[in-house]
């Protein structure tokens, strides 16, 4: 395994050996050289002592023994597996059903990017307390991933791998890991935002719609599916026709008053998945702002009633008060968008959260809190 570049994502951690700041994807400490591993059950990055024969003792839990996930051999995972576990793979990697052909060098690099995004996704799901079971463990409610590449050398008319979800199986086209290709599609589709992590968060929204909306009930016995239909629309609308209409005619002219994106306007299922993805964006970004100690003092001369001081002093993944999330999120987006413009970059969060969109985000928030 080779040291991964430092990136400022998600929680910050500290090396238990030398107190160096660590990040989610790191596999070695740049100061003391200790190997690092992530313990998903305790959401902790830990320095490791090599006990030989593939056994590692985490300094964060010295009374336990672990081994690296089998995918660490491909530089594709830094998560740990308890030595007593029968699984060769970690909680994130055991969700894989199909990985691309790793004899193709380009596929290896693409797969590593896919795994990095998927691990961030699973991190967030576990932090939210959502059920995450592999499909081979529970065929009825389990989750699986297929990472597939288009067949080579068959011309432009050959069938393409479609990114999507069906009955607990999420398929991601390996081409989405190609930054240039993804940007080309983003421009062609007229999307303001398209990321690999965004794909994972969107598709997992479809998965949890099945689990929590279609098959779920409110904690007070209410009609969750009925509430969904009142807010998002009737999902029994013909899906193929709805997508065709969206692609051929575009969204309604006033779509921003109701939907978070133009794609959300195509069908209630897509509206929910887009809203779900944005909720995960919000929570994860607020966690990053929190661990960096960000404190905002927005000066809104157009709205003197706006808060003059916004402290992101809470764990967004554990925050039960939805209004606190939104009250922090909106001024944070104003700030980061302005910073990006100062650097000549497009907005980091190029979306408008209208009141009806915020109500939909609240629905997702309440859904997750009940499930957790």
Image (cartoon, grey):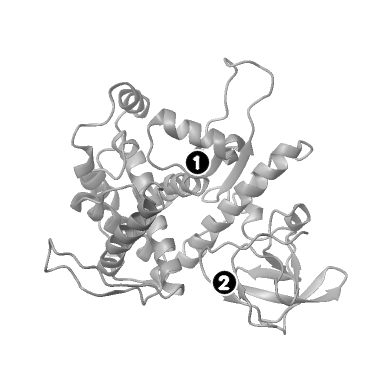
- Is 252 displayed left or right of 64 in the figure? left
Label 1, label 2: how far apart the Cα atoms are: 28 Å
The vertical placement of 166 against 353, above or below, is above
State the residue in front, 263 or 219.
263
Q: Where is residue 244 in the image (x, y as percent from the top left)?
A: 35, 23
Q: Position of residue 172 (x, y in %)?
A: 56, 39
On the question of residue 98 being in view, the answer is no
On the question of residue 350 being in view, the answer is yes
Identify the disc placed on residue 11: none
Q: What crowding class fits label 1: few (fewer than 14 Cα within 10 Å), some (14-19), or many (20 or more)?
A: some
Which secondary structure lies at badge 1?
loop
- Is 312 displayed left or right of 52 in the figure? left
Q: Residue at x 36, y 51 (%)?
A: 341
Among the 4 quarters of the image, the one containing residue 219: bottom left
Which residue is tagged 2? 43
Most extreme residue toward the right is 53
Among the 4 quarters of the image, the one containing residue 47: bottom right
Among the 4 quarters of the image, the one containing residue 22: bottom right
State the residue in front, 44 or 328.
328
Q: Determine whether label 1 and label 2 are within 8 Å by CB.
A: no
- Is 97 displayed left or right of 203 in the figure? right
Q: Sequence-wise, which precedes: disc 1 or disc 2?
A: 2
Q: Which of marks 1 and 2 is in front?
A: 2
- Is 247 displayed left or right of 112 in the figure? left
Q: Where is residue 144 in the image (x, y as percent from the top left)?
A: 59, 47
Image label count: 2
Which residue is tagged 1? 167
Which secondary structure lies at badge 2?
loop
The vertical placement of 57 against 278, above or below, is below
Q: Residue at x 34, y 36 (%)?
A: 263
State the residue in front, 268 or 333.
333
The vertical placement of 132 against 114, above or below, is below
């Amino acid at each position: 395994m080779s040291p991964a570049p430092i990136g400022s994502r998600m929680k910050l951690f500290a090396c238990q050996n030398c107190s160096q700041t660590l990040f989610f994807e790191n596999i070695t400490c740049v100061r003391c050289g200790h190997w690092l591993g992530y313990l998903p059950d305790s959401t902790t990055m830990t320095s490791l002592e090599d006990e030989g024969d593939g056994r590692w003792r985490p300094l964060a839990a010295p009374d336990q023994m672990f081994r690296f996930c089998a995918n660490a051999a491909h530089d594709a995972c830094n998560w740990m597996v308890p030595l007593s576990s029968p699984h060769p793979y970690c909680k994130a990697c055991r969700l894989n059903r199909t990985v691309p052909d790793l004899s193709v060098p380009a596929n290896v690099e693409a797969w590593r990017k896919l795994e990095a995004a998927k691990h961030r996704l699973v991190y967030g799901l576990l932090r939210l307390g959502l059920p995450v079971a592999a499909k081979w463990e529970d065929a009825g409610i389990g989750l699986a991933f297929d990472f597939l590449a288009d067949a080579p050398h068959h011309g432009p008319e050959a069938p393409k791998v479609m990114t999507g979800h069906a009955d607990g199986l999420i398929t991601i086209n390996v081409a989405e890991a190609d930054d240039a290709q993804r940007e080309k599609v983003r421009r062609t589709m007229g999307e303001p935002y398209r990321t690999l992590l965004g794909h994972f968060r969107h598709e997992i929204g479809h998965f949890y719609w099945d689990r929590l909306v279609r098959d779920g009930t409110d904690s007070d016995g209410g009609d969750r599916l009925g509430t969904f239909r009142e807010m998002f629309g009737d999902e029994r609308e013909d899906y193929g026709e709805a997508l065709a209409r969206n692609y051929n005619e575009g969204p309604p002219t006033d779509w921003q008053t109701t939907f978070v994106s133009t794609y959300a306007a195509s069908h209630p299922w897509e509206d929910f998945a887009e809203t779900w993805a944005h909720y995960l964006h919000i929570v994860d970004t607020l966690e990053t702002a929190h661990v960096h100690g960000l404190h905002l003092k927005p000066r809104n001369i157009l709205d003197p009633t706006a808060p003059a001081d916004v402290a992101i002093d809470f764990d967004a993944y554990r925050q039960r008060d939805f209004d606190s999330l939104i009250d922090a999120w909106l001024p944070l987006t104003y700030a980061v968008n302005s910073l990006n413009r100062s650097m000549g970059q497009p907005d980091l969060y190029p979306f408008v959260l209208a009141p009806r969109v915020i109500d939909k985000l609240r629905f997702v928030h309440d859904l997750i809190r009940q499930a957790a």
